[in-house]
Amino acid sequence: MRWRILFGLVSFYVVYLLIGAGVFYALEYTHEENRCQEYLENLAQYNLTQARSTGNVSVEDLRNFIQLVLKAPQYGVQFDSTSTPSCAHNWYYQNAIFFAGTVITTIGYGNISPNTRGGQTFCIFFAIVGLPLFAVMFGAIGDKFAAFFKKLDRRMKSKGRNTKLRKTVVLLATTSFMIIFFLLVPSVIFVAVEEWTYHEAFYYSFISLTTIGFGDFVAGSNPDLTYPSIYRICVYFWILFGLAFMAAVISLFSDLIKGSANKASKKPSETKLDGEDVDEASGNPGADIDNVSLKVPNGAKPFIKVVDDKVTSDGDSETKVSNEDAKTHAALTTIS
């Protein structure tokens, strides 16, 4: 794909993502904020009632309180390290962009989801259009990444390197580049921003770039921390280009496997014209029998001719020849 077309595709994707995030914001933000305030009021009222009671807390009261706490995420409520509840503001515009991106990339962390009927309906149609759009762009960017490393392959080829060794070196170089710049380095950044351990940060990076998306760790979701407004947007574009680079690695790995398989399947063999054997060049039974042509001067009679997939002379005696012979002797001796 040409760079101009790819640039147009990426631009359209970004506009589509921003518009989708705007629609999610319009449909979900006010609804969740109202539900959050309602929940906080109910929680405060419950705590006030318990404070006024003089006896022990009953099992039923304890059960109701647990149910109330478990429903907190559904109302957009989060608890910090001191168990203080607050609104998570999941549908701020920058968070809506991150959510829209995880829908299209099929990561789907699951920590937030649309709660309104309009938001759920829009999510369906947004994904129907966005998924193929992302797949095309994803593949195109991956091909550009792969082309960069294929240049290394061509340079090594010009120096007469072994094909299998050459492709293995290119694959290892690509994989190493991805591990360093899309897993190891981002994990260091997550340690600094999210206050995770390096193991947790690397785990999150791998789970995200493989689109598994468990949702047990999600960037920008810690209620005890304050994040820059564009933090989650930057995280999404890291995911986007990481996925594209992973596609390049998969493409190079597939080329290596296919090349090895094709080389192993090629065996020199003489192909009979009755179609019983497999032609070496095409891999199809009797592939060349209908394509055998004889160059004969005007007015001359051919010494041999093809009849019913068999080569015969001017007499009635049948003579079998190999396809290779038929190709080599394209112009046969003729009798004028």
Image (tube, grey):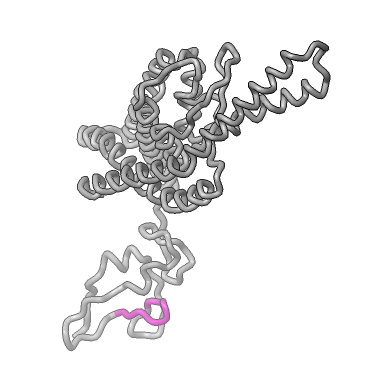
Please say whether residue 142 is one of the residues in the magenta stretch: no
Vertical arrangement, residue 239 with respect to residue 123, above or below? above
Q: Residue 22's spot in the image, x, y percent? A: 39, 42
The residue at the point 83 percent across, 20 percent down is 59
Please say whether residue 310 is one of the residues in the magenta stretch: yes
Of all residues shown, which one is farthest toward the front? 52
The residue at the point 35 percent across, 28 percent down is 234
| Magenta-tinted stretch | 304-311
Vertical arrangement, residue 236 with respect to residue 6, above or below? above
Task: Report the front residue among 107 and 179.
Answer: 107
The residue at the point 34 percent across, 25 percent down is 177
Q: Is residue 60 left or right of residue 152?
A: right
Q: Is residue 110 left or right of residue 320?
A: right
Quadrant of the image occupied by residue 246: top left
- The answer, for residue 253, to whether it is visible in the render is no
The residue at the point 39 percent across, 67 percent down is 287
Q: Residue 257's spot in the image, x, y percent? A: 43, 41
Task: Report the front residue among 214 and 147.
Answer: 214
